[in-house]
Image (cartoon, coloured by chain):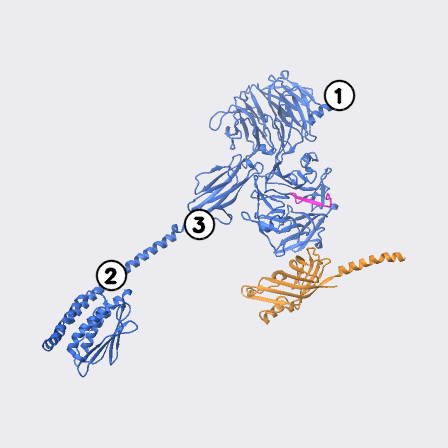
Chain colours: A blue, B orange
Amino acid sequence: MRWIRWFLLLLLWSIYSGSVLSQHLFFRTYENDGADRLQEPSCLLQTSDGAIWIGDEQGLWYFDGQQFVFQAVSDSLVGRRVTALMEDRMGRLWIGYAHGAIYQRVPGSLPTPWLPEEGWPAASITGFALDKEQNLWWSTYGEGVYCSKGGYVYQFGIDDGLPAKDIYTIKSDALHRIVVAHDKGISYLGWKNGQKKDLRHFTKANGLPDDIIRTLLPGGDGGCWVGGYEGGVAYFHPDKQQASLLPASWPGGTVVGMVDFGQADLWVATTNKGLLHWRSDIQAWDTNEVTNWSNTHIQHFSADAEGNFWILCRNKGIASANRRITLQSIDIPSPQCISASDQWVWIGTTEGLFRYEPQYETIQHLVKDANIISMYNDAAGRLWLGTFGQGCLLFDPSTLSVARLGESEGLSNGNILSITSNGKDIWLATLGGVYQTSISNNDHAHSKPVFKHLSHIPSLGQSFIYCTLTDDYQRTWFGSDGKGLSVLYPNGQAEQFMHRVDSSIVKTVYSIASDHSGTIWASTDAGEVLFLQDGVFHSAPFTSSHHAGSFISLATDASGYLLMIHARGIDFWDSENKEIIHFNGAVGLDGFKPPLNGISQPLNQENWILSEKQLVRYHSLNGNFRQSSITTITGVSIFMQPIAFRQQNKFRHNENNLVISFTGFWFTDPDDISYRYILEGFDRDWIYTEDQQVVYSNLPPGTYHFQVQSASNGFFENASTDEYTFTIAKPLWQRFWFVFLIGSMALAIVWQLLKRREQRMQREASLVKEKIESQFQALKSQINPHFLFNSFNTLVSLIEDKPTDAVKYVEKLSDFYRNILQYRESDLVELQTEMQLVQDFCYLLEHRYGNNLRIIYPSTPTKGWMIVPFALQILVENAVKHNVISKTQPLSVQISVDEDDYIWVANPIQPKLTQETSTGFGIASIRKRYSLLTNTPILVDKTPAFFKVGIPLLKTHSL
Amino acid sequence: MRYKLFWCIPLWILFIAQQAYSQVVWRSVAGSIHFTSDAPLELIEAQSNELKGILKPSDGSFAFAVEISSFQGFNSALQREHFNENYLESHRYPKATFAGRIIEDVDFSRPGTYTIRAKGVLTVHGIEHERIIRSEVVLTQNELRLTSAFTVPLADHHISIPHIVHQKIAEEINVKVSAVFKQVP
């Protein structure tokens, strides 16, 4: 009959062990369909601005969690395989190609070739590294290693002692030493005294797992994880010159990538055995991920700044998973509470107690017929199980014996919702108040504990107590229905907290947690999270829509940070950095319905979290992992034209239509990202959006400061910010100097005009004055008695001799005077008119002097010329007046026009014996009048024999 | 005995052929080196046609040498004297050499144009410096034409320039090399 019992046991075991799948990471694969498709991606890098860069057969891709964007570089690089990526300290991205080309990309601009004088290798670039002096090193598959130093490129090849020329990878370790992996082990490369090549080689003789080393992962202490072709993984320290192999047999496969999350949390990707996890707690390789990734041809394996794994493989494309969450489906009826010990995870259900053994992935149903709702693992390894209506069960895992504790042990209420202990005393929160018993009195497994009802402390509450927790200060906290939160101090004193900071009342507390700073957190029946400060409740700073309408279980992770589990997922709150991470479907939580006691206390960096269908292992990541998104402005366009905005931020007045694009990089859950932005100088307040760009059109001139933040969960306090300050210049006509210039120019013009007008008026006034004077003079001379006397004398003789001539003479005389009257008002007269006047005048003179006076007129046509009136007449009169005219000395006055447009009046000098007194008015008057009309001077040419006066003729149109 | 000898003949031929192939050497029949110092105040150029080179295709090794005193074409005779006596000290270091190995595996039996990188030790002014020098090589049936351009910073070869003539001599000298090689059995 013994075999039947064994058979049944085996059957039972197999049923439950078959019902669980292994704990696994939740990988999300990224699809990119269509023409723009990644083809055999082989390298991936996250830069400090948050973006992920991927190299594939076609070139370089940019990935923001949502879409893949191909980076067109230049035609010559189309279809060139990118094989290596690195970011340097200045944020420049170094890109290595399969054909040996090296490009670099400065943030905000396109990649440009990096061309040393020595040229590019003719072999594939397999990696980049920077040493202590920031010299660039790159490894090649076929030509060894290169180093750019002091303006030269040096090669480390076989002739320098490098054992192999095909280099798989190059890394800079924690002490900035350059280490490369090849077919003959690993080599440390450097410069001795900064000049001489220094090479040190280590092989299998130094304990390396394999001759062929494919991967390197620098550790924090200056050592390096090395991954072999088939020998597995070891940790090598060059100072010890000896590698230490992991104490477990290698499951097999070629190492293609390693990720070390610290504290011996090492993950290794292999070509054919998938993903392996080194579990330091069991000192063995966890091969849970093998099934998911075996024979997928993993090409690349790394982690980003958030603690996400990234895998590139030929068959599955690109996938990522968050290290914090591993999970598995479970099929256990109505799970209600969970607790973890070193070896086992205990799950309480309506059907009893289940034991899960993570190492072997088995689950066993140990205690039946008990509705277990709460649980406590004491220091002796015993389990205190709180049931709903059946009292308390004390379970001993070593003997599988169960002791029922009920009314006979003083436990008058059998509904135990929560259990806690300070290691010495244990407290049970029941629907009938708090019960206490001592653990130390129960060393013998057989003697049952005796419970004490704490009814003598009224402030603890006497009816429904939902939760209890003992904190690091040995204070025991109770959350009740109706009486808020109360505390029992180690000295037996108790206190009650019900008030919020706004004096409203908190009656019901569902869950309590105490974080690393000792702050007490409580969740209420309204789905709120509160913390206690100075004896009053404050709302948590992160209260968000995620929580509304569900109860929240609180716990702390291994580092003492708050964890909240609720129907919408798991929230992690870092109270120091004020950052919240929300985990939900994006990390694989599916149909997540955690019970109130569904999270275990932290143990070995982990909390176990229970949901109806899933068992989640939350791994807290210590170290510098990002807990919030990185915000980066990815582009600025002016009128749809992208600009190099990191270099350019000054725009003209008409370049005022800006599109600013930005991305919040949060690969844990890219869909959860939202943004807020403000354009200082334009927007009054933050603007919240889900879009990744903002359009500003028609911005007025001014200086603007654009800030954008991104956050998952809509929690923007302490969110990362990127900013861009730019200036739109004032248009020309609004700038001070331009206005000033134009104003002063206008003033100058007006002043000029005024000045010229004044000059003109002055000139006109003097002209008028001159004219009047000349008229006066002319009149004076013409009616001077001498002239009249002579004229009349001539007339008398004519009347007697030639009466007809006398009539003509009188006519000429009157013509002459009429002309004087007619033209005295004019500034200018036509030369013809003046000539006519002179001819009339001369007619009068000729009669007086007979043939002794000869006037010779010019032969050239005189039309179209202007002259000052009476100018010629005055000159002729002067000639007659100052010279002797007699039969023996006849006078000939010549009027002529020369080619310089002067009209000349010339006469020989025949001085009179008695000089007629000259007023000197004649020429002076002409000169004055001319000076007001033209710059051309009056010419006077006086020789002993001749006297000549030249008067410039004026063209009609020149006036 | 006779049979043994018979078998030895092809082996012997093979050995001879191997020897002959590995012994093939290309020797320069014409070689010139030209340098330019482009300083703010003066452009100095000089050239030597006495560049000698040898190249072993079997392992890609090579050696070049030039007599420093063979450079001609300075701006003045005095300048050439200074070059030889003050800067390059040609009486102490009569030659500049570059010897090493070609990084690429070039098949010297196939005519064509190749860009090669020669890795070697450049010795100027008695100072050795490891350099990679990129060159263009045009291979025809029986001729190899090589052209190359590179820079030599004076400080790297401990050639110090008095401060007074700093503006007349560039800190980096541009060098151009061209050579024609012929196979020598």
Q: Residues within 10 Å of mark 1 (few under 14, many from 20)?
A: few
Along the viewing direction, whichever of A743 and B91 lies nearer the viewer: A743
Q: Mark 2 falls on what kind of element?
A: helix
Q: Is residue A392 above or below residue A699?
A: above
Along the viewing direction, whichever of A395 and A365 lies nearer the viewer: A365
Q: Do pointers 3 and 1 mark residues of a single chain?
A: yes
Chain at numbered mark 1: A
Q: Amino acid at mark 2?
A: Met
Is tag 1's residue or tag 2's residue first in the polypeptide sequence? 1
Residue A957 locus on image (x, y percent): 28, 64
**Residue A652: assigned label:** 3
Q: Mark 1 falls on what kind of element?
A: helix
Labels 3, 1: front one:
3
Which residue carries the number 1 mark?
A5
Which residue carries the number 2 mark?
A761
Give the residue furthest to the left.
A800
Q: Amino acid at mark 1?
A: Arg
Q: Is residue A863 above or below residue A686?
A: below
Q: Do pointers 2 and 3 mark residues of a single chain?
A: yes
Is tag 3's residue or tag 1's residue first in the polypeptide sequence? 1
Residue B15 locus on image (x, y percent): 80, 58
Q: Mark 3 falls on what kind of element?
A: loop
Point out the stretch of residues depicted in magenta.
A206-222
Residue A219 sits inside the magenta stretch: yes
The quarter of the image holding the N terminus of chain B is bottom right
